[in-house]
Amino acid sequence: MASSHNIFLGLFICVFMGQITIFTYAKVYVVYMGGNDGDDPDEILMKNHQMLVSVHSGSVEEAQASHLYSYKHGFRGFAARLTDDQALQISKMPEVVSVFENKRRSLHTTHSWDFIGLAGEETMEISGFSTKDQVNVIIGFIDTGIWPESASFSNTDMPPVPAGWRGKCQSGEAFNMTHCNRKLIGARYYLSGYEAEKQDKLEYNDDPKNKRSYRSARDSNGHGTHTASTAAGRYVMDMNYKGLAQGGARGGAPMARVAVYKTCWDSGCYDADILAAFDDAVRDGVHIVSLSLGLDSPQGDYFSDAISIGSFHAVSRGITVVSSVGNQGTTGSATNLAPWIITVAATSIDREFTANIQMGNGVNLQGESLSVLEMKAPARIISASIANGGYFTPYQSSYCLESSLNYTKTRGKVLLCRHAERSSESKVTKSQIVKAAGGVGMILVDEDVDVAIPFVIPAAIVGRKVGKRILSYINNTRNPASQIYSAQAVIGSQHAPRVASFSSKGPNGLSPDILKPDVAAPGLNILAAWSPAIGQKMKYNIMSGTSMACPHVTGIVALLKAVHPTWSPSAVKSAIMTTASIFDKSGKPMRVDPEGRRGNPFDYGSGFVDPTAALDPGLVYDVTPTDYKAFLCSTGYDEKLLHLVTRDNSTCKTQTFSTPSTLNYPSIVVPDLKSKFSVTRTLTFVGKPQKRTVYRAVVSPPRGVQVDIVPRRLVFDTYGQEMNFTATFKSSAPSQGYVFGYLQWKNGKSRVTTPLVVRTVPSDVGSGT
Ligand SMILES: *[C@@H]1O[C@H](CO)[C@@H](O)[C@H](O)[C@H]1NC(C)=O
Ligand SMILES: *[C@@H]1O[C@H](CO)[C@@H](O)[C@H](O)[C@H]1NC(C)=O
Ligand SMILES: *[C@@H]1O[C@H](CO)[C@@H](O)[C@H](O)[C@H]1NC(C)=O
Ligand SMILES: *[C@@H]1O[C@H](CO)[C@@H](O)[C@H](O)[C@H]1NC(C)=O
Ligand SMILES: *[C@@H]1O[C@H](CO)[C@@H](O)[C@H](O)[C@H]1NC(C)=O
């Protein structure tokens, strides 16, 4: 919120510059006013307008000029240019939940479906289930838009657009009504929040060399086309990346409908635009919203966060929201933390892209690469540290930084370069620097060998161990040489899936009682459709990120909605979580790159998704919108805010959650176990109804914790029947940090698995809870 510090700074500049006009130090703010209980959109618009006029000293013109958006379908509020003082005034008005700055979000940047267990083309059926109703499922993508001509969005053989769809195909630059079809049924774009910031920031530079940007839903970035085709792309026979990974590929739900909401532009995605997209998507009638984007951690309060707000109101209306956990990779960096969102971590698949490196002494090595260039003959290999040029020290040059290499020393050679751990330096750029300095190849030494990089010269990434071996060879050889070959796709060379090193990890920094991420899905080196507007005009591209993992889960949600159209967002989420696996395909516990340590729920949530099992989960943990209210009360929201957000008569007094752990979540976290703590969960039977279906509890307790489940046996007779159980945690030994286990409800054919995460804290004065 506006701080008095900023206001004074504004006045100071005003006086200093000797201006006599009223100083307008305006920024874009989002004003969130809670739920929309069927209020008339025109009335909301008028009300917003009155609020703006009142803070603009009665000036209707100024009020109009400051207005960017009114949110009036999914929830209430508006976005406007305001001074800090005006923002402060508005935040005190009785109907306002929160006022926050228009923050910028970034994008969380085939064969993967075979790996998940959904092989076949579009006609593929999962035995026992018909997914043909996916033609009635509409997925909204909040992203960088779409390349409508891509074969992935062809509407051949698709039935007419579902009745009741209220979206539209908005015309804009290089995009009109004719670009939508029975596959791509809606396309809108949102510029106001982005352009307002562009004007504010004088340093913004419209570099003409930058890739082209379209003022329409057309994708000039590639990210939106990639995510939409991963979730719902049609079958394409000849999908490949520069000849690599050739074959047919499709999205998870190839017959589902696509609606795009373009909110992300060259410099990112702004809150005001994201909320406008949610507002429209709710009214248009989408069934799922997929967003592969988010803030860097730490995430703020739920109702000062555009994605939390938009998704809360979407989920309250039965729309499932799927998002990515983020690419920061470190402990506690997980984002998109709200319990009503499905938050997805990224794993590898069983395909790697590797290049062979032949050393002069006959030793053959392998590195990760997407470069299809190769050296025709061996060349001298040197450490980049001895190619230092200008004022650069050998140490600096060893990282192959811009201008750090001497042309005379580099020309015609293969350079061994280093990459700083977890740095954001571009690896492609390093290959450009070596190329510019006359190098013919590059071997990059990095902790993280996960992500295959499209280097501009023959090049590959090797781990630190291999890097040391190469350096020792260089040191001890008179004429060290090497030859780097073109990258190839290799299947099954390593254990898979593994959690990708960049995938952000728990614990949840906002609500430690809620496990995040929720599940893991493929996000490493994923081939999907692309925007040919950029660079090398490719139709397909390989990308890595939790951004790529998110649409894999979106596709699975679409299949679940096709088979179980009446399930709530939380039932769908529970089905995906409780059927996920914590083992890799060889049956060993899933590991985490780059160290290869054993994974835990902070890495992968409930585990790696299994769409076939998710269609028949047996039991689900369901959550009603009322439960989310109780959750919010238990985390400290007061009655006034609760009322505004939900627009009904619920009060925190009528909500009975003792702690946020009470939420009927498909995982259980006890972040501060003193001596004893109990939670109750409710399971709903969604299996094929038969006389008696018996489930038995099996517990693998976290180390040093005793877990008692009561009752240990649940008997269900009818579809939709609910049963409660209580899990009691007792600390039997003090623990250092978090410990992990799981609870499984088993019957003959299904297993319903719930991760258990506990941190014991010393019990101090009085009795523990
Ligand atoms: C829409 O775009 C197509 C292709 O760019 C063009 O041929 C057509 O004339 C446009 N239609 C309208 C109504 O502008
Ligand atoms: C590059 O290295 C060569 C050979 O050591 C040296 O003669 C030359 O001055 C260096 N050039 C620059 C720009 O440092
Ligand atoms: C190679 O030589 C450099 C200096 O010449 C030295 O710093 C490095 O430790 C040596 N590395 C190996 C693996 O021998
Ligand atoms: C809330 O309570 C008031 C007064 O008791 C009642 O008139 C109104 O219908 C209630 N609203 C809802 C949404 O239940
Ligand atoms: C389960 O527990 C809830 C409250 O925690 C209670 O309202 C409900 O009646 C219980 N259901 C059964 C089947 O016991």
Image (tube, rainbow, N blue to C red):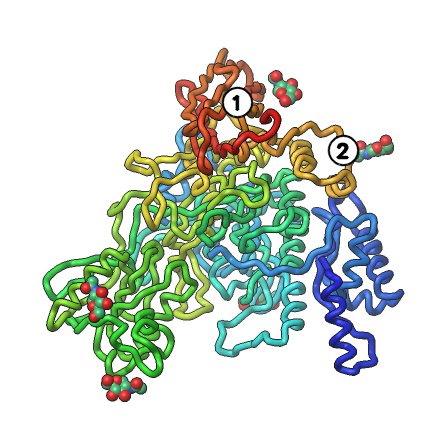
- Point 52% across, 51% down: residue: 183
Q: Is residue 321 left or right of residue 712?
A: right
- Point 30% across, 49% down: residue: 351
Alpha-carbon span between mark 2 and mark 1? 28 Å
Q: Report the residue marked by disc 2.
A: 650
Type of amino acid under label 1 = Ala
- Point 49% across, 38% down: residue: 559
Residue 163 drawn at (x, y percent): 63, 43
Q: Quadrant of the N terminus?
A: bottom right
Q: Quadrant of ligand 1?
A: bottom right
- Point 57% across, 49% down: residue: 140
Residue 535 drawn at (x, y percent): 42, 70
Type of amino acid under label 2 = Ser
Residue 635 drawn at (x, y percent): 66, 38
Tell me if residue 418 can be seen: yes
Q: Residues within 10 Å of mark 2 (few under 14, many from 20)?
A: some
Residue 694 - label = none
Tell me if residue 230 can be seen: no
Residue 727 - label = 1
Res 408 → quadrant: bottom left
Sequence-earlier tag: 2 or 1: 2
